[in-house]
Amino acid sequence: MTGKDPRAIIRMQDVTKFFGSFQALKGITTTINEGEFFSLLGPSGCGKTTLLRMIAGFDEPTDGAIYIGDEPMAGIPANQRPTNMVFQSYAIFPHLNVADNVGYGLKRKRMSRAEIAAEVEKSLAMVDLAGYGKRAAHELSGGQRQRVALARALVMRPKVVLLDEPLSALDKKLREQMQVELRQLQQSIGITFILVTHDQEEALIMSDRIAVMFEGQIEQVATPEQLYRHPVSRRVASFIGVMTLLDARATAQPGNTVRVDIPALGTVDLPAARVPEGIDLAKVEKIGVHPEMLTILQDEHETAERVVEAEVASRSYYGDMTYYSVLLPGANAPATISMRNTFGRSVIDPGAKVKVGWGQDSIILFK
Amino acid sequence: MKTGSALSRNWLVFYAVAYMVFLYAPVVLLPLFAFNDATIIAFPLSGATTKWFTVLWETEALHSAVENSLIVALSTSAISTLLGATAARAMARYRFPGKRGIVGFIMLPLVLPEIIVAVSLLVLLMQLDMELSLWTVVGGHVLICVPFSIAILSSAFQGLDSSLEEASFDLGETRWGTFRRIIFPLVLPGVISSMLITFTISLDEFIIAFFLTGTDVTLPVYIWSQLRFPTKLPSVMALGTILLALSVILLILGEWFRQRAAKRQGIEASATGGFM
């Protein structure tokens, strides 16, 4: 129990889980703060859902401890924990109408009918479903079911709301809309949300902090910006956003800087702040470059810190953006460059020779 | 080509009509002769009467047979539905070693000739020195009805999303409360289907009832014993008519209830399974 943080609402200490001989979680230690939107992000099978179910109380850790608001949760079943879950399938009770679904948990509390009805209506209003109480479960659309599931959790006034891939069943447009709404709702009511997702974009849009998980372990916990700009490892980097990997070598320089030699671009010295802690410079083989961190210079007036000659191999046109695949001299694979199609900027055809601008900040060094 | 398909369509219609006649003509004969004013079962009919129904009303032995049958059928449907529900739940929710084998053995009486079941049960009961009674009949009927209950109920339990139970538990409800408020209402149509089917199976089952009953006879056994007396044939027809009307009403009622419940559940409708 090191580093007890007064802001912490959930603390996990060496949480380990075995299913038979398979180790699903390998010692998770992390802290989730009160009022935070925290995401567990990772590929399927990384243990994120297992961890969420343990916080909810559907599963017990094989080893280690989970604390919610300073209380150890060992042996406390799901129905006595201050958490409520929004299930992936929403789990709307099909034989009950919307109001009875939302009021389901309140019926066990000693509350009068009028009190329950008032709480239900308040909760429905919170998710923009005021007046929907009499609707039958099967009359709801996918997005509405999702809102009812959320209202049903919120009405219980939990310390933590757990969301298990809640948007994965929705179509793209609705999903994007719900991401924003869910985030706004969480901020306005100030309850801690924990989201499980495999969608990195969703995690970046919604979260205060993200824990990236691989094979039962947390690889990095960071804000979306930190995570995107400074991924600690290659697998985190390759999971977050699009990234071009380029061959490189790194050597320590006097004054704590690191010299990075990239055959395709050139040589650059990075200050200590840009070098991840505990990196073994001898093992660095690749550096990463995000598509927006390279730029194609189109006229004489445009300048950049550094410039290299290259050739456009192909392009994908997205309307507002164009993604170019560009052959850098001496690189074995093309680099991806994204350009906004602002006025005055034409779309470049494949085969064109271009000048590519880059700089010290374009380069991401990781373990 | 065109004439060929027209020809085969005509044959199909003919076959369908012949099939329906074969299936339902005997059923139509039943009420026909029940209301016929003659002791001999033959055409031409000789005028309408309800006296055979009056005869039924006045036969003491028949009343006790009906009573016995109701006791047996009600007990059978309750017990086999309860057993079927627990087995269906276990099949849908849990994984355990030898599951396939165990399920296979439970379902076996479905295809076993009833006469085999009846004789072996009789031998067993004799060996155990147990006295034959209505309860031995109930035991035999439960054995053959449980597979039907499982078949009907397993679709109901399999259609039940396990996250519904978790959601209920997560919202503070207990295990028992979850059963009462979520599981039971959702499988209720299946339970009613199962009770109706097993009730009907038990009510008209003859072989096991014949072998395993003691001095108290059930309705089918009573009817069989009456067939030896030609003068009683018309009243047996009347009895058959009543049973026919009753089972049609029961089936319609059961199906109406199932559809109503399924409709209320919306999307789960297809998962609850029906018998019609």
Image (tube, coloured by chain):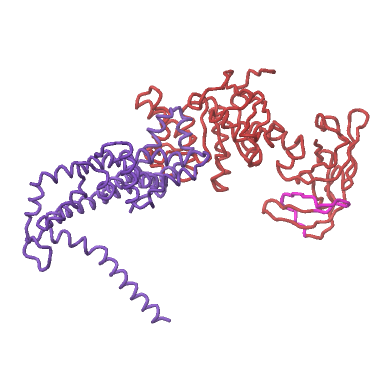
Is-magenta flag for residue A348? Answer: yes
Q: Using the rendered view, name the quadrant where residue A272 is placed.
A: top right
- Quadrant where the image shows the C terminus of chain A: top right
* Residue A264 forms part of the magenta stretch: no
Q: Is residue A155 left or right of residue A114?
A: right
- Residue in the image at 17% along x and 59% along y: B30
Q: Write down which chain is painted purple.
A: B
The colour of chain A is: red
Is any atom of residue A139 visible in this view? no
Q: Is residue B231 left or right of residue A102?
A: left
Return the residue nearer the eye: A150 or A13: A13
In percent of width and height, residue A175 lies at 56, 44
* Quadrant housing the N terminus of chain A: top right
Q: Position of residue B74 (x, y in %)?
A: 26, 40
A1 vs B73: above or below: above
Asked whether A287 or A20 is in front, the reply is A20
- The residue depicted at 71 percent of the width and 55 percent of the height is A316
- Tell me: A120 left or right of A245: left
* Number of numbered discs visible in the structure rendering: 0
Q: Which residues are magenta?
A: A326-349
Of B192 and A318, nearer the camera is B192
Image x and y of residue B105, in percent: 44, 45
**Depth order, front residue of B36/A260:** B36
